[in-house]
Image (cartoon, rainbow, N blue to C red):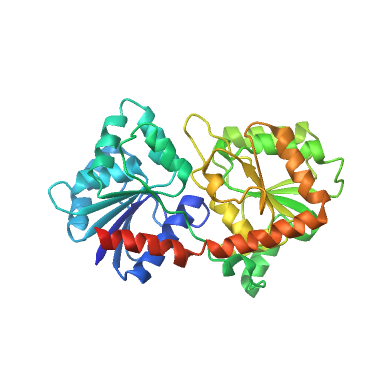
Amino acid sequence: MKICFLAHNLWQDNGAGVFSRRLITELSRALPAEIVVLTTLASGESNEHALIHASRLALLRELPKIRRLIKQCDVVHALDIFPYGFIAALASIGLGKKLIITAIGTGSIHPLYFWRYAPFMRWAYRRAAAVTAISAFTRDEILKKMPELKITVINPGIDITEFSANSNLQPVEAKTFASTTYNLQAYKPYILGVGQLRWRKGYHFSIRSFAKIADRFPDLHYVIVGKRYTDVYDRRLKNLIAELGLGNRVHILQDVPSRTALAEIYKNAELFCLFSQNILHDVEGFGIVFLEAAAAGLPVVGSKNCGIDDAVEDGKNGILVSTRDPDDFADAIAKILRDKKLKGEMGARSLAFARTMSWEKHVSAYVTLYHRL
């Protein structure tokens, strides 16, 4: 079998990239299958073609090449409807190829609310032989606009050995890690958030939540791992940190060199927290970082009524609170930190939960889907 995937990127510094790369890798092993990947941002993989340009004119020029590559494949699998599912549906007209669309989050929901895009997205969804979603929330948001669509929920998986094993930083990498502008030991004890510095990650709320408990935990720091998304939001966070007098206790790390180094940051944290927001259909589709935290044995605190509902066992390995209430978020963090027994129980439950979310288990659902086509 030969599969053509369409995805934004395969980079390892963002949730969509982590999910896309791992799904493609696991499927190629499990089926097995020969893989071709069409992306917007190149990652240097030998089977990758960066043909899906943001510019419409450039994309039109590449459409014949995209069609030729799709013609050589048996199945086309698009990760998110916009623009990847639509391009896959358009480029495969008349070729008789089976199309799968996997809805990840914003890119599969947001366009359904815009009159310019919605008819084309609905057309592409209906052309698909199968539609999957990475969370029940993502599925339900799509069904609000297309209630007739059949969508199968298949959550992402996690490799627990990547985050729970003993440190395996290589000497050169360790030197690079230590030479950055931060020092993990100086920040301990710390709570941790991981994700791009963008509005939907809710850092403008979670920093305020940290400020509310800072006096109760005078030695506690807040470490945020995430790359700049816009200058506007980056400035807002820096101004907020200064305004609250937290310059020595809130640390934004944008230069973590690798997944291995990221695992070290997880393993040294007290708990994981991310106050994701749904903003005009810009949503948290799942929250892979919550699985990463669980694999590291951390209790977690997050938001209800988004994709995180599938990534956390509320009340067991963590606490989910209503969005846009920094007081509730602060109280949840404090509740776990001040109760060592609860913290230990939730951490143990996180690791147990992560074991149930293995990639081997979840990719088998995709394999079954492929065999039914």
Q: Is 55 in front, or is 327?
A: 327
Residue farthest along the top direction in this orientation? 115
Q: Does residue 123 sit above or below 73 in this rendering?
A: above
Quadrant of the drawing holding the C terminus? bottom left
Q: Residue at x 66, y 60 (%)?
A: 349
Total numbered labels placed on residues in the image: 0
Q: Is residue 248 left or right of residue 29?
A: right
The answer to whether one can see residue 53 in this image is no
Residue 352 vs residue 86, the one in the foreground: 352
- Location of residue 50 in the rendering, given as x and y in whole percent from the top left corner: 33, 53
105 left or right, relative to 334: left
- Please determine whether, in this image, residue 253 is positioned above or below residue 371: above
Q: Residue at x 52, y 31 (%)?
A: 279
Residue at image position (58%, 70%) is: 161
Q: Quadrant of residue 266?
A: bottom right
The residue that appears at 41% across and 34% down in the rendered structure is 110
Quarter of the image containing the N terminus? Answer: bottom left
Pinpoint residue 205: horizontal percent, then vertical percent.
Answer: 67, 34
Q: Position of residue 144 (x, y in %)?
A: 39, 32
Residue situated furthest left in the rendering: 94
The relative height of residue 15 versus residue 162 in the rendered view (above or below) is: above
